[in-house]
Image (cartoon, rainbow, N blue to C red):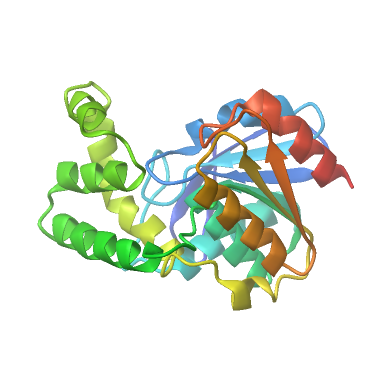
Amino acid sequence: MDKQTISRDGTRIAYRRTGQGPAVVLVSGAMSTGATVAPLAAHLSDRFDVFVYDRRGRGDSGDTRPYEVAREVEDLAALIEAAGGETALYGISSGGALVLEAAASGVPVRRAAVYETPFADYGGGAEERAKYTGQLTEALEHDRRGDAVELFLRLTGLAPGMIANARRSPMWADMEAIAPTLAYDDAVMGDGLVPRDRLAGITVPVLAVAGSASPEWLRRATKSVADAAPEGTYHVLEGQNHMVEPQVLAPVLAEFFSR
């Protein structure tokens, strides 16, 4: 990241800006930095002024304790100010929950798009989320970062054998380095259910996108987000899963942000 802005609590937020046109800020999900959404930025920069940033506690950005979701909303507000005072927002996975919270908080956003925010609106979903929160909190309190990463990977449905292989891979050290931010994403997700009352207060258009190859519960949760927002639209990308291909998603976002 080659630029920075200062959030309200003094935290340094690092970002990169590419392209020209209306401003768009891209928000990454758990266990990721701004580099995760950089390929999508490349597909949007011919039509938009795209901001990619490292969320607090990750990459080149700073961190300030104690953490609160409101501080991450303030980080977005600082980026929006750097962009000229108003932007569109896009967030993937738990980053989408942050985008929705920012829009509901009254941050100057003209449009908000999310991809498969993993709200668990199904039988036992809230209980599973509460169990994960408890185990994650315990692991991080004892600085068992590897265990925290494994808990998250299990939550995403990754098979035990693949987790074991990941532990032996060179990328594991990087994953452990940002493991404390798993608590941040967990806080952003709340109780894990679609925050319908909160979404009902969003006054800008919302696009909720899911992939046809993703689990049915993710598609259902995504549609629930669109249904709860007063100006919500649900869109399905054929053949895509949670690891959405940026060249497939970009045209859908571009059309939505250009309206």
Side of 212 where 75 appears, left or right: left
Side of 57 where 232 appears, left or right: right
Side of 78 where 58 appears, left or right: left
In the rendered image, residue 250, in percent from the top left (x then y), is placed at 72, 32
Q: Residue at x 40, y 56 (%)?
A: 185
Side of 95 where 238 appears, left or right: right
In the rendered image, residue 220, in percent from the top left (x then y), is placed at 58, 54
In the rendered image, residue 73, in percent from the top left (x then y), is placed at 55, 63
Report which quarter residue 213 is drawn in.
top right
Q: Residue at x 28, y 63 (%)?
A: 133
In the rendered image, residue 246, in percent from the top left (x then y), is placed at 63, 28
Q: Residue at x 16, y 45 (%)?
A: 147
Q: How many marks?
A: 0
Report which quarter residue 200 is drawn in.
bottom right
Residue 152 seen: yes
In the image, residue 193 sits, relative to residue 12, either above or below, namely: below
Report which quarter residue 45 is drawn in.
top right
